[in-house]
Amino acid sequence: MVNLSKFVNVPDTFVSVDASTNNIAYAVFKNKELVVYDKVKFTGTNVFQKISSAVIEVHNVFKYLNVQALVIERAIFINSPKTMSELSMVQGAILAGAALAGVKIFKGTNPIAWQTFIGNGKLTKDAKLLMRSNHPGKSESWYKNFEREQRKQRTISFVNINYDINIDDNDIADAIGIGHYSISNWDKLGD
């Protein structure tokens, strides 16, 4: 049987999203060109207030942007069940706000898939050893944080070089990176 998903074209206009429990960074691509990018902060002092804010803010912004499709970085479990639960709820609110704004197509991607695609995958064992030899005697949490910060900077650099822009916000850079991956890998995105 022929896999018809390989013949599905990238929509003319789509938005790629990097979400957290506090904000949404987004990048809009039209005809495979980056046209808009920004970040919207959610209001509220608890996750339920932020969920309500997310629906309203995303609806308002996406209604104005008039996008056909949305690609979101899927929430993955790292360390905290509470964080995973709250992020999943906020992502649901983001999808609801987008649907209310007229978005019809929803896709998701794994963080490692798009990060690896742009050359920013997990550090190799040798790279971790080099990092430790360059910064001896630090705690495990220090090394993890240092690696995370280095990877954020690599994504920012990739985006600034490939799109000839000058941003320093890692969330916006992630949203653009997700979109960059999506253009070439639309058929690999999950429904």
Image (spheres, helix red, strand yellow):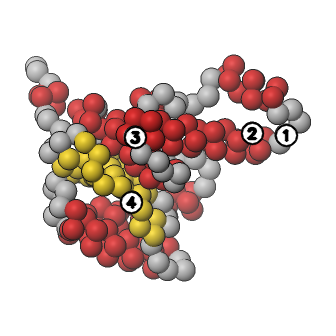
Q: Residues within 10 Å of mark 2 (few under 14, many from 20)?
A: some
Residue lying at 69% horizontally and 45% vertically, measured from the top left:
145
Amino acid, disc 4 = Asp
* Residue hosting label 4: 38
Question: Dot 1 lies on which element?
Answer: loop
Is residue 76 rendered to the left or right of residue 97?
Answer: right
Distance CA(mark 4)–CA(mark 3): 16 Å
Amino acid, disc 3 = Asp
Q: Residues within 10 Å of mark 4 (few under 14, many from 20)?
A: some
Is residue 50 rendered to the left or right of residue 29?
Answer: right
Residue lying at 75% horizontally and 23% vertically, measured from the top left:
130
Residue lying at 38% horizontally and 45% vertically, measured from the top left:
176
* Residue hosting label 3: 164
* Residue hosting label 2: 143
Distance CA(mark 1)–CA(mark 3): 36 Å
Indicate which label's residue lies in the foreground, 2 or 4.
Answer: 4
Indicate which label's residue lies in the foreground, 1 or 3.
Answer: 3
Between discs 4 and 3, the one toward the N terminus:
4
Distance CA(mark 3)–CA(mark 2): 31 Å
Indicate which label's residue lies in the foreground, 3 or 2.
Answer: 3
* Residue hosting label 1: 138
Distance CA(mark 1)–CA(mark 2): 7 Å
Between discs 1 and 4, the one toward the N terminus:
4
Q: Position of residue 109 (x, y in %)?
A: 36, 41
Between discs 3 and 2, the one toward the N terminus:
2
Count of numbered labels shown in the rendering: 4
Q: Position of residue 76 (x, y in %)?
A: 48, 47
Amino acid, disc 1 = Lys
Amino acid, disc 2 = Tyr
Marks 1 and 2 close (CB-CB < 8 Å) = yes
| Location of residue 151 by image quarter | top right
